[in-house]
Image (cartoon, grey):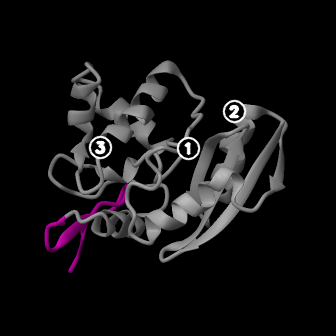
Amino acid sequence: MKLLFDTIQTPIGQVFLVVENQNLCFVDFEGNEQRMKQLLEKRFGTYQLEKTQNPFGYSSKLEAYFAGDLSAVNDIPVSTGGTEFQQKVWLELREIRAGETRSYGAMAAKLGQPTASRAVGMTNGLNPISIVLPCHRVIGASGTLTGYAGGLERKKWLLEHEGVKLQKPVPLEKPNQAVLFRT
């Protein structure tokens, strides 16, 4: 399987994007190359990455998002792979508009499975197409910034970039650690 890939520079680090046919199938930040490799191997088995500048214009659309055009990524076709439940969760992320957030419990309820907030959270953490499927817009019920494969500081930046008014101080939860407060 041949997959096209490109990288772009953003205010919060380099972003990798991978395209299968004409569908975006992976977006993540630098530092997550091992995660990318694992997810692509799980989904495609043997694959080959071919460096391609701005495949199908998707790099330009991501750059436009980071430049302030928050809707620039809304129409990029995606191919997520995953189970039926995972696909439902990941595609539901597109229903959360820029400037809005939703709790894991609210997402579970919206999917018709109100007791599945943990499953939604775990699935959110496996989202292969960051930013375009905006998992950063899902936060803890108490307003805490919980889990983000790109790092909580990036999640905070993305939400503020989209105009979300975060509490001051913003609690940043880290697994197996006490809650830290940043001002």
Counting from the top left corner in percent of width and height, residue 18 is at 68, 49
Counting from the top left corner in percent of width and height, residue 129 is at 53, 46
**In which quadrant of the rendered image does the C terminus lie?**
bottom left
Q: Mark 1 or mark 3, which is nearer the start of the sequence?
A: 3
As measured in the structure, the alpha-carbon distance from the residue carrying label 3 to the one carrying label 2 is 26 Å
**Front-lying residue, 3 or 140:** 3
Relative to residue 75, is residue 28 drawn left or right? right
Relative to residue 27, is residue 161 drawn left or right? left
Crowd tier of the residue under label 2, counting other residues whose Cα lies within 10 Å: few below 14, some 14–19, many 20 or above: some
Residue, x 17% and y 46% (percent of image)? 141
- Give residue 96's mark: 3
The residue indicated by pointer 1 is 128
As measured in the structure, the alpha-carbon distance from the residue carrying label 3 to the one carrying label 1 is 17 Å
As measured in the structure, the alpha-carbon distance from the residue carrying label 2 to the one carrying label 1 is 10 Å
Residue, x 37% and y 53% (percent of image)? 136
Q: Are marks 3 and 1 in contact (CB under 8 Å)?
A: no
Question: Which of label 3 and label 2 is nearer to you?
Answer: 3
Counting from the top left corner in percent of width and height, residue 103 is at 22, 43
Q: Are marks 2 and 1 in contact (CB under 8 Å)?
A: yes
Residue, x 57% and y 56% (percent of image)? 28
Q: Is residue 101 above or below residue 170?
A: above
* Range of magenta residues: 165-183
Element class at badge 1: loop
The residue indicated by pointer 2 is 43
